[in-house]
Amino acid sequence: MSIPQSGGGPIESFDQLAGMMESGCKPKADWRIGAEHEKFGWLTDTRAPLPYAGDRSISAIFAALESRYGWQPVREGEHVIGLTRNGANISLEPGGQFELSGAPLASTLEVGAELQNHLDEVRSIADPMGVRFMGIGAAPEWTHDQMPVMPKGRYRLMTDYMGRVGTHGTQMMYRTCTVQVNLDYASEADMVKKLRVALALQPVATALFASSPFFEGRPNGHRSWRSRIWRGLDDSRTGMLPFAFDQGMGFQAYVDWVLDVPMYFVYRDGKYINALGQSFRDFLAGKLPALPGEKPTLSDWADHMTTVFPEARVKKYIEMRGADCGDQAHIAALPAFWVGLMYDQTALDAAWDLVKGFDTETREGLRVAASVSALAGEAGGVKIMDLARATVGLSHAGLAARGFGEEAQLQPLVESLKTGKVQADRWLDLYNGAWGQDLTPLYQASSL
């Protein structure tokens, strides 16, 4: 989840909203890669989720990261709710998911090195405490009542609202983990093509990285339960954005959609003011019930943009949001997969040729099929396995053209294409075989 945004004065012109996205345009030489991943902490003696406070806790790990490795605390009130260092951030999801949001880097090899350093630092502190972290898309056994609640005002508001607008919102907040990559665009036209390719191929990422076949102690009938959860959350702010494929798509069309998404909050003086269900359009007119007579700032708009959750999201860059978290190799593979497709023009053009004929029903059908069956899924006459083979091939060629030697990071995906099985399939095989339908071994098997 995003931290409160800062910077930018009052919004004086409607054009400033699209202008914020346009300000993200960069020449190719300045494109960077920002990777993020979330992971569950657990206590090795009880397999209980890692609490926020106590001798063995998130707070204790934060304090040690600060004292040993130079991370600086980010506070909300009296609580440390994150850390920052050299352009990277460590933050908390609602249920204590421990998230690294990496610095903007030039290659996926640098991203992989950053990941390794992060895991080394965290392990050096957590292991002696009897704490481990698991790379998995959804908590395999814990119930909602077992999850710790992080001391962040944003999450208190969201928890209440999620319970009223959908069926799975609190499951997403407290019991799922993802891996994402944030990528740049050169122009409005480049943003549109990348967003369209990202949306249409997000089901391929969902399938290749599916790692959440268990929930509340048993198989859930899906390879990616995390992806299933997003389909029952809040239709006003999630999904595959059919309008992105309409003629005339651009920065303003995206702004118009975000403006129609109900608000969560306004952040003022270190506190979250409840604006649940209210309209940012009313805010622009000075008619927001939560702050009568007050008009928004650009940071308010930036905050509101973080409260939409489509499968690919635009801010000053594009976020790829369709994948479950997995083991270290898969966390490193996700940025490589998308960089190969997005940062080489030949690969991007070829990827668009693959998907430009899909209609709205096919794209949505693939999303559903990927969550249920991963690489075995099919919709609209399109087999996900065939699409994944073509897509990984294009990504490999795009990475090779970049000349950094990043192609090797795709190896976990290549192996899945050879066998037809992703991490979720392999764990289900173990569960029904060597594990004797006992999920205890999964904690070690998924440890980072």
Image (tube, rainbow, N blue to C red):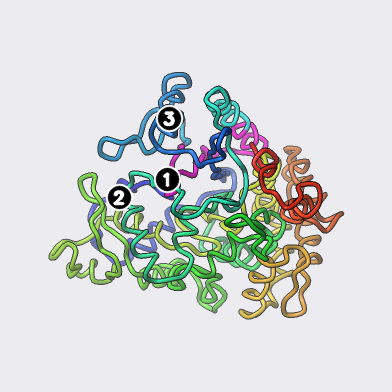
Image location (x, y in percent) of residue 263: 32, 65
**Cα–Cα gap, marks 1 and 2:** 15 Å
Q: Residue furthest left?
A: 293
Q: Secondary structure at mark 1?
A: loop
**Residues at circles 2 and 3 in contact by the CB criterion of under 8 Å:** no
Residue 34 seen: no
Residue 62: assigned label? 3
Question: Disc 1 residue type?
Answer: Pro
- Residue 170 in magenta stretch: no
Residue 153: assigned label? 2
In front here: 302 or 384?
384
In front here: 404 or 180?
180
Label 1 crowd bin: few (<14), some (14–19), many (20+), radius 10 Å: some
Numbered disc total: 3
Q: Residue at x 42, y 19 (%)?
A: 67
Q: Residue at x 81, y 66 (%)?
A: 386
Question: Which residue is the site of mark 1?
Answer: 148
